[in-house]
Amino acid sequence: VSVETAGTRAPVRDSVEFARIAAFTDGVFAIAITLLVLSINVPPDLPGSQLWDYLVDTWGQVFAYFLSFAVVGRFWMTHHHVFSLLDDFDQRLIVLNLVFLSLIVLIPFPTELLGDYGTRTVTVVLYAVVVGTASLLNWAMVAHARRAGHLRPDAHGAARRVSGGVLWSAIVFYVSIPIAFVGAGAGQLFWLILLADVVHRRR
Amino acid sequence: VSVETAGTRAPVRDSVEFARIAAFTDGVFAIAITLLVLSINVPPDLPGSQLWDYLVDTWGQVFAYFLSFAVVGRFWMTHHHVFSLLDDFDQRLIVLNLVFLSLIVLIPFPTELLGDYGTRTVTVVLYAVVVGTASLLNWAMVAHARRAGHLRPDAHGAARRVSGGVLWSAIVFYVSIPIAFVGAGAGQLFWLILLADVVHRRR
Amino acid sequence: VSVETAGTRAPVRDSVEFARIAAFTDGVFAIAITLLVLSINVPPDLPGSQLWDYLVDTWGQVFAYFLSFAVVGRFWMTHHHVFSLLDDFDQRLIVLNLVFLSLIVLIPFPTELLGDYGTRTVTVVLYAVVVGTASLLNWAMVAHARRAGHLRPDAHGAARRVSGGVLWSAIVFYVSIPIAFVGAGAGQLFWLILLADVVHRRR
Amino acid sequence: VSVETAGTRAPVRDSVEFARIAAFTDGVFAIAITLLVLSINVPPDLPGSQLWDYLVDTWGQVFAYFLSFAVVGRFWMTHHHVFSLLDDFDQRLIVLNLVFLSLIVLIPFPTELLGDYGTRTVTVVLYAVVVGTASLLNWAMVAHARRAGHLRPDAHGAARRVSGGVLWSAIVFYVSIPIAFVGAGAGQLFWLILLADVVHRRR
């Protein structure tokens, strides 16, 4: 029992342990975002005219690349923000963080699918499930940090706003799932609501 | 002789050297865990109905991905815990750490194998050999740190418990090898004992 | 409104936040530069004589690898230099940094294209667009940092010089685009102007 | 001229700049060593008996993986040691470091070649050229640091020993090139001299 107690609350903000968790998380984000480029393929040995046609056809892969770069980049910025609000953490937060990361790391898979099969409903559904669930886990991390008292005293307002933002993300992606059954393109267009939200908040 | 003496005990906990070893190790963990996604393949140019069938068939790859993510994530948490118990380190610990990492980095290979050929005995054996040996090397690192006096004065109890945990992991994976010769699925189910253990310790 | 104010100027040079942004950026650079090696392919099962012919043919891939390593390495050195001039940063700088990184991470794609199809105009154009735009975004980051007052008091001279250097890079790559329509090789040779510049400044 | 003077000697051991260079280098090492696993291939859709035969045939790839893991790990340990001897650095050392890293990052290519075509002379030659030249550049870095006065006052003895070690590595790999023309296996066996050396120094 004392083990669990010792492991539950011990490490604090400025410790080596906190720095290592942040560094590991940043590393995973950095790699996941960089692996996205592997979803753009270069086929060997195409003759001149076919190369041109091929590159025109890769626009879907390039679009999927930039979309997922924006999505992962946004998650990283939010994570960065959430960690700056913490005073303290516990083992459950580390585990939640790992589960969250397991979905971030998965993103190159639906991205490649989106680049190759962007007009299929199943592709849009899979993308929305992965990104929506990652948002939900992000929300769960903030909720746990609030409930377990790991926030800095002055960070409760900021945490509430972050919490609202990621929950909104999750809702938009989940709602796009039934829409994608009507039309794959409509499901993707629905994601633009999040962009509108960013533009709105900036004003 | 003086070289070896100089290199054997010099760096301590708060040194740049210790930070670099931790950072390198975290980097390797972060990359190995992120490369796991590459074991999920997206084939180009499938017609509509075949894409659906294909994605249903990838459940094995997705399962292998999450399994290995949990395995590598767990190794990282243990490593993180072990390093927080150290006061000091020597060249042998760095070498043991590298040998341990060479097995962690290898994990994407049996993972891909498990995703593609999860019902074959040879696959389960290979997975168990790699993960079991990684656990054993983890145990060897803790054992060396204890014997060579690199632990913090207050860390002996925690080190004994970590030591027991990784040894137990190694035993479960090694014992699953003969079981896999009876049935590949039985070998994989046997690994769940470790999960039961986690659940038990949480209570 | 207070959120935006709080998020706009808060983090400073020695904060954990600044360190995480630098670490994330370094991580992305490190991975992008390392993924370049994946653009060199090894085909399985070639008989003896064909292996030799194949390796002779990979010189284009090896050349493209070293070129892009130099390009990404140079960008990293510049970025490193720019960050050493900062006193402070804001959310817009983080976003500009992410957009800039989205082009750095893309570089393995035109690199692989250059290695496989180095004699085609479209390849040289794509390479120049990606690297030229990355240079332009680098310039935009420095310009924003100067305008928004995020530079260290003594860093204005250095910032002006860095600014000039990256703008010059952007111009050279953009000008190589029309040249590549005359001849793919001529477009690539034009890039050597940047090398001449480095040699000149060293004297 | 003042630019160069400003950029030549400014950053020192405990600066953010030094930390970023070390972190970037560690990141590149960590990724290069982790990408080695990609040289082990898993072919899809093999029937039962062929999978077994296939895995027996991968022993060459697994051997190449562990060899290169040891090589890159050794380079990292040496680099780590060299950086712990520095007091200071200049732009030339950063450039030498990048050129050195461009060969480290290349190692997965000859590794994959060695795994697939280990019995061919050209493979052994390429591996020896890349690793030998990396050793030579490592030597050049130490030589420059000594000549330009960037070493810690008490580090000259250690630097001389490191210098000798990496030069010896370079010589062994270069000498293995003519030997590989006699026999590919003989060239690879010759590399074991370095192992003997490690064993000898340990005593």
Image (cartoon, coloured by chain):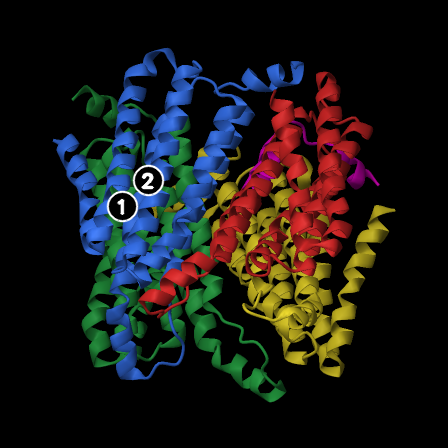
Chain colours: A yellow, B green, C red, D blue
* Image quarter (top left, top right, bottom left or bottom right) of the C terminus of chain B: bottom left
Locate residue B9 relative to residue B48 in the image: left or right.
left
Q: Which residue occupies 34% across, 66% down?
A: C49
Quadrant of the image occupied by residue C142: top right
Q: Which residue has dot 2 on it?
A: D132
What's the magenta bit mostly, secondary-structure-wise? helix
Identify the disc placed on residue C143.
none
Is any atom of residue A11 visible in this view? no
Is A55 placed above or below A146 here? below
Magenta residue span = C1-26
Label 2–label 1 contact, CB within 8 A: yes
- What distance separates the C-alpha of mark 2 from that of mark 1? 10 Å
Kind of residue at disc 2: Gly
Which residue: 76% across, 40% down?
C171
Q: Amino acid at mark 1?
A: Ile
Confirm whether residue C122 shows in the render: yes
Query: What residue is shown with label 1?
Result: D177
Chain containing the residue with disc 2: D
Which of the 4 quarters of the picture holds residue B151? Answer: top left
Please check the rendered image and state whether residue C7 is part of the magenta-colored stretch, yes or no. Answer: yes
Q: Earlier in the sequence, mark 2 or mark 1?
A: 2
> Badge 1: few (under 14), some or many (20 or more) residues near its Cα, within 10 Å?
many
Q: Residue furthest bottom?
A: B49
Residue A127 at what x, y percent from top left? 63, 69
| Residue D96 percent coordinates (x, y) | 47, 30
Residue B124 location in percent, x, y?
A: 29, 72
- Near-viewer residue (D138 or C89): D138
Mark 2 or 1: the one toward you: 1
Above or below, comparing residue A96 to residue D47 in the picture: above
Q: Residues within 10 Å of mark 2 (few under 14, many from 20)?
A: many
- Image position, residue A85 (x, y; %): 63, 40
**Secondary structure under the numbered disc 1 in the rendered image:** helix
